[in-house]
Image (tube, helix red, strand yellow):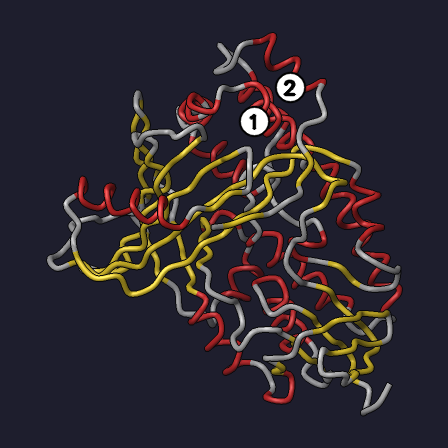
C-alpha cells in the first residue's frame, strides 16, 4: 500500500469508532491512528442517551470530555394502566457535540472525514477515491448491515428537536409514553427536555417490518406535541431503523462480514443490546478494551474481539428470548403490556436490565407471575425461528 503505515485505522466514525479512537489516543498518545468516516462529521445525525448506572468509573471518565445534557431527578414512564417516576440519573449526548469533542481531543492527523472505505484487509484499507492506507491494526466500526443470518424485528423511529414558543414545563425525561395509539406495533414517544424552551421528541415503534414513512411519523409527532400543549419551531431531527435481534446463526453472520484478522466492533460487529438496540455501554466497554491491547499485533486483537463478541452473544441470550415473545407471541397492538409489566419491577433490576447485566434472580423475576402474553403463544414463539433481518426500506 502507498503512503506511510500507521498503527491503527478505525473505520466508521460513529459512537463505537469515535470512542475507540479517543480511548486509544488517550491511552497511547505515541500511536499514529486514523478515524476514517464516510460523512463530513463524526456521529452522523444522532442522539445517544444512557443511565449513569450503565457505566463504571473508567467508562464515565471516557465520556467526561463530551458536552452532555444531564438529569439527576430521574425519568418518567407512562402506560395505559401504569405510570411511574424512576430515580436513575440520565444523560444524553448529541452528535454535534460528539463531533466537536473528537475534533478537539484527537490529533488533527487522525481526523479523516469525507473518506469512504470500500475495502478492509488486516493490514490496511482502500478508500473510494482509490487511495490506500496501510495500518498495523484495522478496526471495523461501521453501521449494522441487514443480514439473512439473523432473525428479529425492527425499531423504527423519528425524532424532532423543537423550540417551544413558551416554557414547556417538563422537568424530567419521559423515556416511554405508551398512552398513544399503537398502530399495529409497540409504539411509544420518548421526550427529553433539553432546556426550558427546547425538547427532543421521538416517536418509536417495535415493528415487524423496517418501514419508515416520514410523512406519517411527522404527523403523529405533530399530534402528540399538540396534545401535550407544545408549539414552536423545528430546529432539526433524525430518523432511524435499528435491528432488534431475536436469534439466528451468529457464527455465519460473523463470517459474512469478511476475512479474519480485522477487529470488528460496534453494531456491525454484533455489540448491541438485542432487545433495546442500545449500544452505548458496549461501545464504551469495547473502546476501553481496545485501548488496553492496542499495542498488540492486529490478528491477536481481532481474535480477542472475536471471543469477546461470542461471549456477548451468549450473555445476551435471555434478551433474544424476550424479543421473540415480544414479536412472535404478543399481538402488535398489545406489545406495550410487556413493557408495562416490566416497569412495575424494582428499580435496581430495571437498571441492570438496560445495562445488559441481569442476574439470575432478575431473569427469574422477569419471567415469574402472570405473563403478559398467552403461554401457548410464548411457547410457539420460543420454538419458532422468527423473521430474517433483511430488506431495510424507507419512504
Q: Is residue 282 above or below residue 248?
A: below
**Labels 2 and 1 touching (C-beta < 8 A):** yes
Residue found at x 18% / y 44%: 226
User: Horizontal and vertical percent for residue 363?
Assistant: 59, 25
Residue placed at 49% from the left, 35% from the top?
Answer: 206
Which residue corresponds to the image point at 54% horizontal and 14% vertical from the top-left?
368
Rate crowding at label 1 as few (under 14), some (14 to 19) or many (20 or more) other CA atoms within 10 Å: many
Choose the circle earlier in sequence order: 2 or 1: 1
Where is residue 331 shown, x and y percent of the image? 49, 19
Rendered location of residue 383, percent (x, y): 72, 18
Residue at image location 49% in from the left, 74% down from the top:
99
Which quadrant of the figure has residue 161? bottom left
Q: Which numbered circle lies on residue 381? A: 2
From the viewer's perspective, is residue 50 above or below residue 180? below
Give the answer, above or below, for where 152 lies relative to 242: above
Instruction: List the residue tagged with mark 1.
Output: 327
Amino acid at each position: 500500500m502507498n503512503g506511510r503505515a500507521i498503527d491503527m485505522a478505525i473505520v466508521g466514525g460513529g459512537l463505537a469508532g469515535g470512542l475507540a479512537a479517543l480511548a486509544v489516543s488517550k491511552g497511547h498518545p505515541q500511536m499514529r491512528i486514523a478515524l476514517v468516516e464516510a460523512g463530513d462529521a463524526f456521529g452522523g445525525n444522532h442522539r445517544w442517551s444512557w443511565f449513569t448506572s450503565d457505566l463504571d468509573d473508567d467508562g464515565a471518565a471516557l465520556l467526561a470530555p463530551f458536552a452532555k445534557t444531564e438529569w439527576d431527578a430521574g425519568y418518567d414512564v407512562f402506560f395505559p394502566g401504569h405510570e411511574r417516576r424512576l430515580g436513575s440519573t440520565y444523560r444524553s449526548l448529541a452528535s454535534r457535540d460528539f463531533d466537536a469533542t473528537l475534533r478537539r481531543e484527537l490529533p488533527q492527523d487522525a481526523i479523516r472525514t469525507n473518506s469512504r472505505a470500500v475495502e478492509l484487509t488486516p493490514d490496511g484499507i482502500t478508500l473510494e477515491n482509490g487511495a490506500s492506507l496501510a495500518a498495523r491494526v484495522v478496526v471495523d466500526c461501521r453501521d449494522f448491515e441487514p443480514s439473512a443470518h439473523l432473525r428479529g424485528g425492527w425499531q423504527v423511529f423519528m425524532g424532532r428537536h423543537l423550540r417551544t414558543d413558551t416554557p414547556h414545563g417538563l422537568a424530567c425525561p419521559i423515556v416511554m409514553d405508551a398512552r398513544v395509539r399503537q398502530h399495529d406495533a409497540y409504539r411509544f414517544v420518548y421526550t427529553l427536555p433539553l432546556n426550558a424552551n427546547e425538547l427532543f421528541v421521538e416517536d418509536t415503534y417495535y415493528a415487524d417490518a423496517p418501514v419508515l414513512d416520514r410523512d406519517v411519523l411527522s404527523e403523529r409527532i405533530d399530534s402528540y406535541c399538540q396534545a401535550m400543549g407544545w408549539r414552536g419551531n423545528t430546529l432539526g431531527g433524525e430518523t432511524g431503523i435499528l435491528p432488534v435481534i431475536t436469534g439466528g446463526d451468529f457464527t455465519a453472520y460473523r463470517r459474512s462480514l469478511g476475512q479474519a484478522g480485522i477487529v470488528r466492533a460496534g453494531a456491525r460487529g454484533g455489540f448491541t443490546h438485542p432487545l433495546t438496540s442500545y449500544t452505548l455501554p458496549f461501545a464504551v466497554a469495547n473502546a476501553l478494551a481496545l485501548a488496553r491491547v492496542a499495542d498488540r499485533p492486529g490478528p491477536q486483537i481481532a481474535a480477542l474481539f472475536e471471543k469477546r463478541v461470542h461471549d456477548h452473544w451468549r450473555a445476551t441470550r435471555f434478551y433474544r428470548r424476550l424479543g421473540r415473545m415480544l414479536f412472535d407471541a404478543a399481538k402488535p397492538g398489545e406489545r406495550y403490556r410487556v413493557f408495562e409489566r416490566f416497569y412495575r419491577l424494582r428499580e435496581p433490576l430495571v437498571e441492570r436490565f438496560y445495562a445488559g447485566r441481569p442476574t439470575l434472580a432478575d431473569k427469574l423475576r422477569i419471567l415469574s407471575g402472570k405473563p403478559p402474553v398467552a403461554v401457548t403463544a410464548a411457547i410457539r414463539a420460543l420454538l419458532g425461528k422468527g423473521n430474517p433481518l433483511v430488506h431495510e426500506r424507507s419512504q
